[in-house]
Image: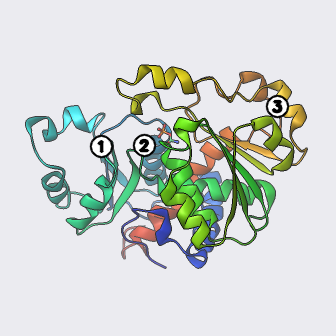
């Protein structure tokens, strides 16, 4: 199965998801063996207009582990010709001549779709403002499957900045493809899950509840998906940010309320929403989750680039 552009989580169906998981599992073995040289004539361009640790490093490490090459800029907003007024579309047209796949992160919702619309080579959305982060959702789902052994029938709490968090939006779309999943949205009034996602869930008959008391939800769920309140998206609304921050913190007392087989996830980075005392509990899955990003992104690149060309291995 070959993938082309990856722009939104809705584009995946369960058969593609199963293949992503299967290939990710194979990639874990590939990494244990030290990688492969399958794609040593292929080039990935990473174009990040917003900061990143996990997504950019894991994509770049994934391409290196597959034997491919990477061209990148530390900060596309400052160090690419966009700073001279070049449009995103022109930048993408130019990189089409240099790279076989483009991974883009941008502050504007819809930027990856705009890039894909003018791109001959596959474009991967690595986060578009408060829009979506589909590859994060793929690695989140892979983590749930790996940690718990199933996705159907799970009860999952999403906590924190649900209005501006792109990872929870993409994850909600993917979870709507599974059976008997129940979602609990725990957020302050200003950061509630947006209506487009709630409407999608109703259309697909996915059960969800909106709740303000995290302690009521903790004993009920299999997964607690914590998120950071995204200060950078508040702009000059400092008072609103102050109203929302620090309301939902997972700490030692939260662990006592959680089920023994439940897991805590977080797309990271965290600020103060998970106390460090939680890190040593076996249910804290967020660092394993970030590690899975490498395997899932290797799988995605492999499915995009297809069979290695003759003579490249
Ligand atoms: N989860 C995630 O997108 O992390 P980065 O912002 O560090 O890439």
Q: Nearer the viewer, residue 171 or 239?
A: 239
Which mark is on residue 72? 1
- Report the Cα–Cα distance between label 1 and label 2: 9 Å
Label 2 sits on residue: 56
Q: Is residue 33 left or right of residue 11?
A: right
- Quadrant position of residue 121: bottom left
Q: Secondary structure at mark 1?
A: strand
Q: Residue at x 36, y 74 (%)?
A: 309
The residue depicted at 82 percent of the width and 31 percent of the height is: 254
Residue at the (39%, 25%) spot, across then down: 237
Return the disc, 2 or 3, that comes first in the chain's sequence: 2
Label 1 close to label 2 by CB (< 8 Å): yes
x, y percentage for residue 218?
Answer: 81, 41
Any mark on residue 119, and which? none
Q: Is residue 161 visible?
A: no
Q: Which residue is mark 3?
A: 254
- The answer to whether residue 81 is left or right of residue 158 is left
């Amino acid at each position: 199965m070959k993938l082309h552009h990856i722009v939104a989580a809705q584009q995946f169906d369960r058969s593609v998801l199963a293949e992503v998981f299967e290939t990710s599992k194979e990639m874990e073995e590939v990494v244990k063996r030290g990688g492969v040289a399958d794609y040593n004539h292929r080039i990935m361009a990473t174009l990040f207009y917003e900061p990143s640790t996990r997504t950019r490093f894991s994509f770049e490490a994934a391409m290196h582990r597959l034997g491919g090459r990477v061209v990148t800029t530390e900060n596309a907003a400052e160090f690419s010709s966009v700073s001279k007024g070049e449009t995103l579309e022109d930048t993408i047209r130019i990189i089409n001549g240099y790279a076989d796949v483009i991974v883009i992160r941008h502050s504007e919702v819809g930027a990856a779709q705009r890039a894909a619309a003018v791109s001959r080579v596959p474009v991967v959305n690595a986060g578009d403002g408060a829009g979506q982060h589909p590859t994060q959702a793929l690695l989140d789902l892979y983590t749930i499957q790996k940690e718990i052994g199933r996705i159907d029938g799970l009860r999952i709490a999403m906590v924190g900045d649900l209005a501006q968090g792109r990872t929870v939006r993409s994850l909600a779309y993917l979870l709507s493809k599974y059976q008997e999943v129940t979602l609990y949205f725990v957020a302050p009034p200003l950061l509630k899950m947006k209506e487009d996602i709630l409407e999608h869930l109703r259309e697909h008959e996915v059960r969800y509840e909106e709740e303000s008391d995290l302690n009521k939800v903790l004993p009920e769920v299999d997964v607690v998906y914590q998120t950071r309140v995204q200060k950078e998206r508040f702009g000059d609304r400092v008072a609103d940010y102050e109203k929302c921050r620090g309301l939902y913190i997972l700490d030692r007392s939260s662990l006592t309320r959680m089920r023994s087989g439940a897991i805590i996830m977080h797309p990271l980075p965290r600020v103060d929403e998970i106390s460090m005392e939680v890190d040593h509990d076996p249910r804290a899955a967020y660092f394993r989750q970030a590690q899975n990003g490498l395997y899932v992104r290797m799988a995605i690149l492999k499915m995009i680039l297809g069979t290695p060309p003759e003579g490249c291995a």
